[in-house]
Amino acid sequence: MTKVTAQLSVSLDGCYAGPRHEGGDWMGSAEAAKFFRVTRWAVEAMAWRERHGLAGGEQDVDSDVIRESFEAAGAYVMGRRMADGGEEPWGEEPPFRAPVFVVTHRPRATLTRRGGTSFTYVTDGVASAVARAKAAAGGKDVAIAGGGSLVRQVLAAGLLDELELHVVPVVLGDGMRLLDGDLGLGDREGVELTPTRVLHSPGVTHIRYRVDGRAPLVPAEPTS
Amino acid sequence: MTKVTAQLSVSLDGCYAGPRHEGGDWMGSAEAAKFFRVTRWAVEAMAWRERHGLAGGEQDVDSDVIRESFEAAGAYVMGRRMADGGEEPWGEEPPFRAPVFVVTHRPRATLTRRGGTSFTYVTDGVASAVARAKAAAGGKDVAIAGGGSLVRQVLAAGLLDELELHVVPVVLGDGMRLLDGDLGLGDREGVELTPTRVLHSPGVTHIRYRVDGRAPLVPAEPTS
């Protein structure tokens, strides 16, 4: 059955990048510096490098996690800012090799790239993009590629089945947090999850969760 | 050698309790509801219950982690709010069985309790409390007992050697975050850590880190 999954690299304080940068020179921004620290483990992994047409890299548990993640995805859903930011660096043969549905308010004609990747711009909301990706996934999973605010929207809408966090051992102090406060939870309510797999290397801890969904907060049984 | 350690239960979004509650009925507050959800795994563990004079509980990896943590500590450092809040529930025989140094601005005479616990109120700052605890620890570790803001102060001051997070699989949406933004880091700088142990059960993932300290953020090697 097609699952809706997301995986994201975060710092120990939950940031996937530095504070949002507006205007030019993104590469020189604190947003980018923190993003590149948090994703360093992936860029150093062989499976990531292969998908991006680069030689070298480590063949280790981190690389296995990335390879598996690419292989499991039959379609992607992506935010417009990420899609626009990636358009140039991903080039003519992006790493996805599957249909990508871009959530946006601004219509654009579908882009078809080499290697199986296409970008279809969806203007009628996140749920519609997820539904279209499910239909296109050929029985594989739908991966929410990011950015973080899209992952959060999908989680808040109750559409996410599985979340894998790659927890990087650095504290960044500030930046964009994946799990920030706009999930619409009541003050006695949480989103409950169940860890289903924990893998680790010196540079990152991979924790995969099944998303069980919103539920009232339950304390321990009374202690007497 | 005496290490300075801290261990804290946090939600997947980094909260150790709900939003700070002022005034009466703390037990009925959202701060408490979220605190009790995040610490539920501990209250259900046999080693925690034994230390609190309660029967029952699970004897599992979670209980081992708690037992080891109590046994490693030769002295504690604690914030005043936590010490005051615990004074009544901990009763005549608190679970620490070691000297506790309470960081405060308001002087108070030392309290001596049964079973080896004492509370000494230190008014000349966090570093002084840590130094006094080290001198009292008899070669064992100094544990920063909390609350979260004290742990953060000790981390920011470069005094923390080891941090263990008990990551509970629930998203709380808001609350007090252990690693919030007042660490005084520059925007190209982080606190780097190295994971030294990862243990997990269905209810919580225990990740222990050595704190390496502040360092400039390093990206991956150039990709060409």
Image (cartoon, coloured by chain):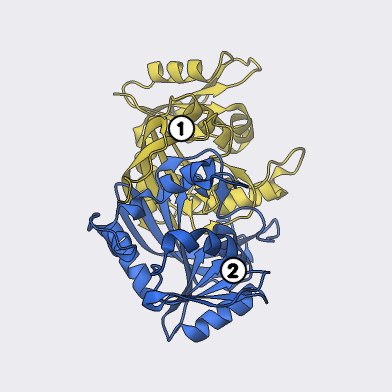
Chain colours: A yellow, B blue
Q: Chain of mark 2?
A: B
**Circle number at residue B154:** 2
Name the kind of residue labelled 1 in the image.
Answer: Phe
Mark 1 neighbour class, 10 Å CA radius: few under 14, some 14 to 19, many 20 or more:
many
**What is the quadrant of the N terminus of chain B in the image?**
bottom left
Nearest to viewer (mark 2 / mark 1): 2
Say what secondary structure mark 2 lies in: helix
Observer able to see residue B109: yes
Q: Position of residue B20 (x, y in %)?
A: 60, 47
B82 vs A212: above or below: below
B122 vs A66: above or below: below
Q: Residue at x 33, y 46 (%)?
A: A222
Observer able to see residue A59: no
Kindly indicate the quadrant of the structure image that contains residue B121: bottom right
- A143 or A208: which is nearer to us? A208
Q: Residue at x 55, y 56 (%)?
A: B220
**Circle number at residue B216:** none
Q: Chain of mark 1?
A: A
Name the kind of residue labelled 2 in the image.
Answer: Val
Are discs 2 and 1 less than 8 Å apart at CB? no
Mark 2 neighbour class, 10 Å CA radius: few under 14, some 14 to 19, many 20 or more:
many
Q: Position of residue A192 (x, y in %)?
A: 39, 36
Rounded to the nearest whole Å, what is the CA distance between mark 2 and mark 1? 44 Å
**Circle number at residue A96:** 1
Looking at the image, residue B13 sits to the left or right of residue B42; the answer is right
Q: Position of residue B146 (x, y in %)?
A: 52, 62
Looking at the image, residue A60 sits to the left or right of residue A49; the answer is left
Q: Position of residue B129 (x, y in %)?
A: 59, 77
Looking at the image, residue A26 sits to the left or right of residue B6; the answer is right
